[in-house]
Amino acid sequence: MTIPLPAGLTAETKTLSGWGRTNPVSSQVVQPSSVEQLQELVRGAPPRSLIARGLGRSYGDAAQLKDGTVIELPAFDRIVLDPASGTVTAGAGVSLDQILRVIVPAGFFLPVTPGTRNVTLGGAIAADVHGKNHHVDGSFGNHVQRLLLVDGSGILRELTPSGRSSVEEAEFFWATVGGMGLTGVIVEATFSLIPITSSLISVDTTRYRDMESLMAAMVEADAKYRYSVAWVDSLDPKGRGVLTCGDHAPAEALPPNLQGDPLHYDPKALASAPPFLPGGLLNKFTVRAFNEAWYRKAPKRRVGELQAIAPFFHPLDGVKDWNRIYGPAGFLQYQFAVPNEAAHLVPRALEVLRQVGAPSFLTVLKRFGHSNPAPLSFPIPGWTLAADVPAAIPGLLEVLDQLDEEVAAAGGRLYLAKDSRQSIEMFENSHQKLYKWRTQFSTIDEKNCFSSSLFERLTGNDH
């Protein structure tokens, strides 16, 4: 639908999709230059017509809206580091990559970083992103001290997690964290940082021949390391994998040749995936060959290897547009979280994907610690498994529907930032605090002007 635009604001019609390159839609894209222009846009918007978008790294349909207006915020690019308090205040349109280039040379690191640094601050809060350190530090929202939000009435609100001015303020804050942009447009945030004395990570790597020993080692690693993640060979019936754990290396522990500039930070993209690739490039044979090579190249046991931030935290950012390798049909990522007592669903999910012939070379297993108060935040104490699979696999969606039921029955849920196909029933059955969030949502957006393709799908509405 076409909505009235404030003076000086222009729109461009674009075809948008998520990082998985599925479910494309046509939307009107605008880029407000100021908070006031954004407020005017929101005040004139009809119901279910707006959604904010960052850098398009949500895998599914969370940051798009068919025939709606999509708000991008590249003009909201301020970054202010306060070394004394160990915090940074930044505009919502700033990427984590831009923030890292400011804070790392100054001796700080992000409190939480997902697997890519090419996401905006606003997107990181809206998805309440998690990283390799959730078992220690929780998700991104845990570290946000304040945020500025333009709500559905066009009012600029300052929100804090404790609600300095009212209980309602705290409720709106936590409804926005993990709320997938549906409570309004985040325009700025202040969050705490991790102090570091070097930009290197001390990494321990170990290979495991089966899933049981790998998962046991991951539980033990919870108390030993700040960061831990496992790559799993999805095609191996035993579930062999590689566990990588690490901590920030202190400057005094660096070799002499690195102590001259211990906070050096200069990540680079190594290559670009070809724009057009045959849809059958990824199959069980090519993925099996890749997985074999990846497993064999990992050491059986290596301790104290020094790695730079980029390859340890964001290895796929080294290949620009890597999502093209799945071909024109795109791909989906199936990521679920289940409590510790449902750990059996990790090997169960991998077995089911093997049976349907869904090859995945990007299969990642992590540990989760305590949840935060955000009703729609993804992490729960236990396990999370993420597997990228080509979208065109016959019978894939039916198999995933069955897995959904098992995950929900075990008290688990799917990650909204990765989702592109879960049902209304799955969403409602797996989010115990959904009613609370809906109550908060209807209060903060009384006009109901924010929506998305994701929200339309999960509420049964259709433009």
Image (cartoon, helix red, strand yellow):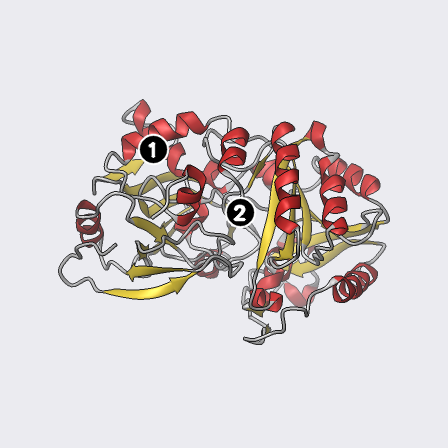
Of the pair 144 and 70, the residue shown nearer to us: 70
Could you tell me which residue is drawn at 28 percent across and 33 percent down? 444
Identify the secondary structure beneath mark 1. Answer: helix
Q: Position of residue 447 (x, y in %)?
A: 23, 37
Amino acid marked by disc 1: Phe
Name the N-terminal-most of marks 1 and 2: 2
In the depicted structure, whether residue 340 falls above or below residue 449: above
Hey, which quadrant is residue 148 in on the image? top left
- On the question of residue 168 being in view, the answer is yes
Q: Which residue is mark 1?
A: 441
Count neighbours of disc 2 (C-alpha within 10 A) and say few if under 14, some if 14 to 19, many if 20 or more. Answer: some
Residue 242 vs residue 55: left or right? Answer: right
Q: Position of residue 338 (x, y in %)?
A: 64, 34
Q: Which residue is mark 2?
A: 421
Residue 219 vs residue 320: left or right? Answer: right
Identify the secondary structure beneath mark 2. Answer: loop
Amino acid marked by disc 2: Arg
Could you tell me which residue is drawn at 74 percent across and 45 percent down? 352
